[in-house]
Image (cartoon, rainbow, N blue to C red):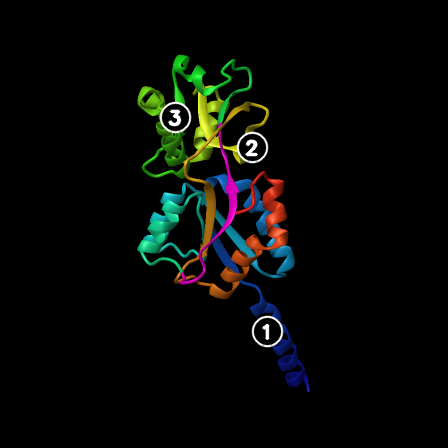
Amino acid sequence: MHKKFLAAALLAALPILASGADITVSAAASLTNAFKELAQSFEAAHKGDKVLLNFAASDSLVQQIAKGAPVDVFASADQEAMDKAERLKLLAPGTRRDFASNTVVLVVPAASRIASLADLANAQRLTTGNPASVPIGRYTQEALTKAGLWAGLQGKFVFGTSVRQSLDYVARGEADAGFVYATDVQAQKDKVKAVATVPTATPVRYPIAVIANAPQPKLARRFADYAASSTGQAILVKHGFGKP
C-alpha cells in the first residue's frame, strides 16, 4: 500500500516538474526596459516558464547566435541585422515579423545649450553606435548623410558598442551630444534631454524571429506572438515604442 501511494505521488508530481521551461531571448540594447517588463508579463501568463534576457547591439547578438549560443528568440533594432541572421540561415522559416517602431533623437546633457543639429558644428565630441555593427549608428550615418552633415561631423564621433553605451557617454558628460532612440532617453531622463527628432530615410522598425535551432521552439513562438499581441504592444507603447 505504501509503495502504491509513493508511486501515485511521484506520478502526480511529474507534470509539475515538467511544465516549466526556460527560453533565452537575445534583444537589441534599446529594448532593455521594455523587454524586462514584457518578460515578467509573459512569465505571469505562462506559469512555470522563465525568460532569460540577453541584451547587446543587434549585430553582436547575430554573431553570438552564429557561434552556437543557445538562443530561442532574436529581436533586432533594424532590418540589416535580421537580414544577416537570415542569410546565415539562423531563423526558423516564417517566424520573422516587425513588432515595434522607434525614432532617432539628438540628446545632450541636461544643462547643455545645444538645441539643434546646426549647433553641432561647435561641439567637440559626439557619439552614436558604430555604424559597422550597431543599428543606431547606421540610422545616424544615413540621416546625417542625407542632411549633408556627415562629412563635416564624422571626425567628432566616439562610437559606442551599443546605443546604451552612447547614451551613457552623454549622461556622464563625456560627449557634447549623441544620437540615440527616443525610447532610450527615459533611462537617463535626469541627466539627458532630447532636443531634436532626426528624420531617417529608413524607418526604424524592429523585427523579431524564432531561432532555427531554438532549444524551446514552441515556447519561443509563444513569446514572439506575445510581443505582437495586444498585451505585448501595450507594454511596448508604455515604454515609448510605436506600432510596427
Task: Count neighbours of disc 2 (C-alpha within 10 A) and say few if under 14, some if 14 to 19, many if 20 or more.
Answer: some
Q: Which residue is drawn at 61% across and 56% down?
A: 43
Judge from the rendering whether residue 50 lies leftward or rightward of residue 97; answer left or right. Answer: right
Name the amino acid, label 2. Answer: Ala
Q: Which of 2 and 145 is in front in this view?
A: 145
The part of the image, by quadrant, that contains residue 33 is top right
One can see residue 27 in this view: no
One can see residue 58 in this view: yes
**Which numbered mark, 3 or 1, is in the foreground of this view?**
3
Task: Tell me, for residue 147, which label it has, or none.
Answer: 3
Q: Residue at x 55, y 23 (%)?
A: 193
Q: Where is residue 53 in the image (x, y as percent from the top left)?
A: 50, 49
- Whether 192 is among the magenta residues is no
Task: Count neighbours of disc 1 (C-alpha within 10 A) and say few if under 14, some if 14 to 19, many if 20 or more.
Answer: few
Q: Name the residue under label 1.
A: 14
Task: Tell me, for residue 169, which label it has, or none.
Answer: none
**Which numbered mark, 1 or 2, is in the foreground of this view?**
2
Asked if the residues shown at circle 3 and circle 1 are in contact, with their CB atoms under 8 angstroms apart, the answer is no
Asked if the residues shown at circle 2 and circle 3 are in contact, with their CB atoms under 8 angstroms apart, the answer is no
- Whether 96 is among the magenta residues is yes
Name the amino acid, label 3. Answer: Ala
* Residue interval drawn in magenta: 92-105
Above-or-below relation of 89 to 126: below
